[in-house]
Amino acid sequence: MVDIAKELRRYLQDNGRNILLGLLSVSVFLIGWHLYSYYLSSTDSAIKWYVPAPGVVAEAFMDWFDAPDPGTDVWVSVHVIASLKKIFLGFVLALSVAVPAGILMGSSRMSNALGRPLVEIFRPIPPLAWIPIFLVVFVGWGGIAIVFLGIFFPILLNVQLGVRSVDPVLVDAARTLGANRRQIFLKVVLPFSVPYLMTGIKVGLGIGWMCIVAAEMLGSSTGVGSLIRISADLSLFPTMYAAMVLIGILSVLTTGVASLIERRLSKWMGMR
Amino acid sequence: MTIDIRGLGKVFPKGKKTITAIDGFDLQIGEGEFVCLLGPSGCGKTTVLRLVAGLEAKSAGSIKVQGREVVSSSPERGMVFQEFALFPWRTVRKNIEFGLELRGILEDRRKAVSSRLIDLVGLEGFEDAHPKELSGGMKQRVGIARALANEPAVLLMDEPFGALDAQTRNLMQKELLRIWSATKKTILFVTHSVDEAVFLADRIVVMTARPGKVREIIPVGLPRPRDRTSKEFIAVRGKVLAELDEEFEKARAKELSPD
């Protein structure tokens, strides 16, 4: 933990300027949003109920710390844990299938020829499209299956890329040092692919969060995705926006942990 | 005879046609000898080296190292690459110990060997550095130490100093001679630099343009350390250059011909 705090401090020091620029663009966005909702509130337009001021959204967000969520009547932590659980299970399942599949497709032309068409057919299908089928087929696991799909492809493709990118001269070197096929795989191909895997995990987690609303669309009453839907149904728009912000924060935190691990690993491995 | 190459041939497929890279290549190298392979680019010097290493399969002839026919790569033939080919995720020490690790040698023994080699190649203080922290010359010191860790009978070097600047290159040539005299390895060294070959080799093998075979073997016969500015050095250089020039011309004529 101490290490991570140190790492974070160094990151803030190194990226001070970029962080300031980021804050600047976010501020401009918030001011624009505020002005727009201020303008709407002075009109008779019905849209004004749908666009509360950022301050109102922030209030709705802070209210979660004092009382259960107004729409769903449970503490917001229940929703967060429910979504994290889906992301985590979807992630673990995706990792355990995508890594072996990616290694296989990266190292054998035949497996690539077999797997590629399936990947190309299924990858562009929006997770939302699966909802009706998945909820029937997987019942309670339907949401996890949707998150799984989102995380699966980035990991698969990055692992495959990693395995394929192995520098052939490193394989030659290992062979002249006496490595057999198994040793080349374990001691050259695998370590070489680790940074690629981490990139896949980072991208995959981000997409996993993008799928969470779809994953909680039906048949689920907890989770931040459900929170958005239920708040909208009850016209609790400030809470709905706060839930959107919450997803953003959760996504940044989880992918942040992944990229922290990625950076540390790459550095420890001397790759960057 | 440590390396005995007879009638070696190598044919590569290229589209529907084939290219004869090596044809009727003969070379015998004695124990502890330092031989440089020199020739116009594309003459197949590196191919010969890779065939001896067992990284590629020969199409004809025979390669015997210490009396045994080469069928695949083996730790008894260490190789040093122009691109260094170090494992970026391994420290200097772990790179050097790679071959020992593969053979399941225990850590204490590995460490003893790598420490000795780190001393030999002059990398004290960099044991725990990763390759990206090293200069080109230091990287190649690791490459040499890593190949030596397996105690190979022969050291195959594929333009090992080709990626280095002139200063570092000269220094590394001297270092290599020092390491060679300390380890008494048989070395087959590919280069396209006449100067480098005359400075290093006991004998220089000048190859023909493709298909590559031995054009001429020139014994250098100068005492070491060699002085690049001495009359004798320049004389040998001139002789090698004359041989090479003719092959360069042939190679160029071939390149310009429509076929």
Image (cartoon, coloured by chain):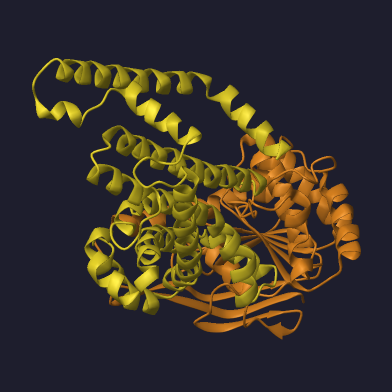
Chain colours: A yellow, B orange
Quarter holding the N terminus of chain B? Answer: bottom right
Q: From this view, report whether residue B203 is shown above or below residue A268.
A: below
Q: How many numbered marks have been drawn onto this rendered protein structure?
A: 0
Nearer to us in this view, A136 or A161: A136
Please state if A224 lies on the left or on the right of A269 as rendered: left
Query: Residue B74 appears in which quarter of the rendering?
Result: bottom right
Quadrant for residue B85, please give it: bottom right
Q: Residue B143's quadrant in the figure?
A: bottom right
Q: Residue A115 location, x and y as percent? A: 34, 74
Q: Is residue A201 visible?
A: yes
In this view, A149 is above or below A133: above
Look at 31% across and 35% down and name the residue there: A241
* Residue B86 vs residue A162, the one in the foreground: A162
Q: Residue at x 27, y 18 (%)?
A: A34
Task: State which quarter of the image contains the C terminus of chain B.
Answer: bottom left
Residue located 30% across and 32% down the image = A238
Q: Position of residue B211 (x, y in %)?
A: 44, 69
Quick check: A238 left or right of B95? Answer: left
Q: Can the viewer see residue B41?
A: no
Residue at 20% over, 19% down: A36
Left or right of B114, for residue A92: left
Q: Is residue A177 above or below residue A29?
A: below
Q: B93 or A49, which is in the foreground?
A: A49
In front: B76, or B110? B110
Q: How far from the left and from the top, in percent, is residue A167?
A: 52, 58
Q: Report the side of B259 relative to B7 (left or right).
A: left
The spot of residue B139 in percent (x, y) is 68, 46
Residue at the farthest left position? A44
